Amino acid sequence: MNLGQTVFAQVMDFLPMHQFRRCVDRYQGNYRVRSFTCYDQYLCMAFAQLTYRESLRDIECCLRAMDRKLYHAGFRGKVSRSTLANANETRDWRIYRDFAQVLILIAKDLYAGDDFGVQLDETVYALDASTIDLCLSVFPWAKFRKTKAAVKLHTLLDLRGNIPSFIHITDGKVHDVNVLDILVPEVGAIYVMDRGYLDFERLYTLNQVPAFFITRSKTNTKVRRLYSQAVDKACGLRCDQIVVLTGYYSHKRYPEKLRRIGFYDEQQQRQLVFLTNNFTLPALTVADLYRCRWQVELFFKWIKQHLRIKAFYGTSENAVKTQIWTAISVYVLVAILKKRLGIDQSLYTILQILNLTLFEKVMLFQLLEISDYTSENDSTHIQLKLFDS
C-alpha cells in the first residue's frame, strides 16, 4: 500500500518539468527513444549524486534493489548500466547544461536578498577556475600536459547564497583569463578575481560595460601615481591611490585611470595590492570584497568532496560533461529546496540526510527540520562559513 511519496520523488517535485522538457526538445534528446528517456537518465544521475555511487554497476545494483519503489519515485524506464552508459555517451550534454542554467536563475532569485558579510546594493561575483585531474590514457580528449589530462571548471559565483551564476567547462590547457571573452558582464555588478585574470585589454572591456572589477596587482605592474587619499593604517590599509598604467602595452590596452589600494593582512603577514575601477567604495570595503573571494575556493572544495565529479561513469567528453552538469544541477536543486522549505540546516547536512532516506516515505520538511541538531563546525575557524543559513 502506498502511504505517500518517497523522499526522492518529493525532492524531484522541485524541478521545473516544463523547462526540462523544453531543454530536451531543443536538442532532440528523446528522438527515437522508446523507454529510457532523458528524464529517466537525469533521475539515475541525480540518484548517483545524492547517494555517492561509485560506478554504473553500483547505480544499477542499488536502484534494482529498490525496484518496487522506483515507479513511485518517478522512474518509468528499466534501469540498466548499459542503457545508462549509452545515454551518457550519446545524448547531448547541453540538455543538462541548459537545465542547470534554468535552476541557477531560480536559485539566484531566491537568494537575492541574502547577506554575504558586506553591505552592498550591487551584485558581487567571484570568478575563478578549478582543475579536475584525469588519466591521459583514459581521457585523451582532455588535453592538459604531456603525461596528464584534465578538465577545468570556470565558475562565476554569486556571493549571495553561493550560487554559481556562470559555469564553463574546458580542457585543462585553456587559461583562466580566456573565460572573460565569453562572459557576458552585468551592468553595475562587481567582479572579484585573482591576479590570474589581470589582462588589461579584457578588464577594459568590463570597464566599458560599465561593470566593476577588483583584482590583485602583479609585482611587475608599472603605474604612475596621480594622487593619494588618506587611509586609516590601524585597520590594515597602507595606501589608496589613483594611478595610470605606464607600460607601453598596458597603457594602450587600458588608457583610463585605476584605483590602487594597499592592504596588510596581519593573519597571513603579507602585503596585498588591489586594482579596481571603482572609485566610490571605501578602501576597506574593497579589501573585504577580495577576502570574500575565498568563497569560490570553498565552493570548489565543497563540490569535489560532496558531489561525484572526480570519478566519472564514462570516458567520453559527452559523458564527463553530462555528469558534471547533472552534479551542478543537483547542488542547485538542493539549494532551492533549502530556501523554499525554510530549512535551517546546511547543504552538507541536508545531503547527508537525503543520502540515507531517499526511498523512505516521510514528509520532506519533517525529515530535514531537525530541531536538536548542532553543527560541529567551530565558529572561530579562520575560514569563512560556507552554505550555512
Image: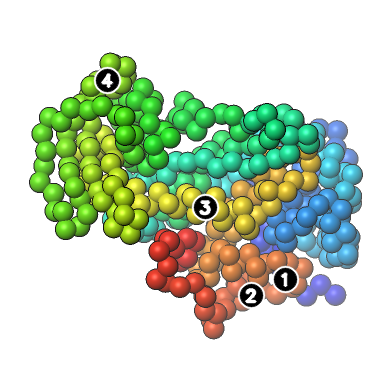
Q: Secondary structure at mark 4?
A: loop
- Callout in the foreground (1, 3): 3
Instruction: Kindly indicate whether the residue at mark 3 contacts the one at mark 4 (C-beta within 8 angstroms).
Output: no
Q: Secondary structure at mark 2?
A: helix
Question: Which residue is labeled 2 in the image?
Answer: 367
Q: Amino acid at mark 4?
A: Gly
* Disc sitting over residue 153 in the figure: none
Residue 110 as seen in the image, left or right of residue 284: right
Q: CA distance from mark 1 to mark 3?
A: 25 Å
Q: Could you say where residue 276 lies in the image, as x and y percent from the top left?
A: 27, 37
Q: Secondary structure at mark 3?
A: helix
Q: Amino acid at mark 3?
A: Phe
Q: CA distance from mark 2 to mark 4?
A: 61 Å
Q: Could you say where residue 350 lies in the image, as x and y percent from the top left?
A: 60, 67
- The answer to whether residue 73 shows anywhere in this view is yes
* Disc sitting over residue 247 in the figure: 4
Instruction: Tell me which label, 2 or 4, sits earlier in the chain.
Output: 4
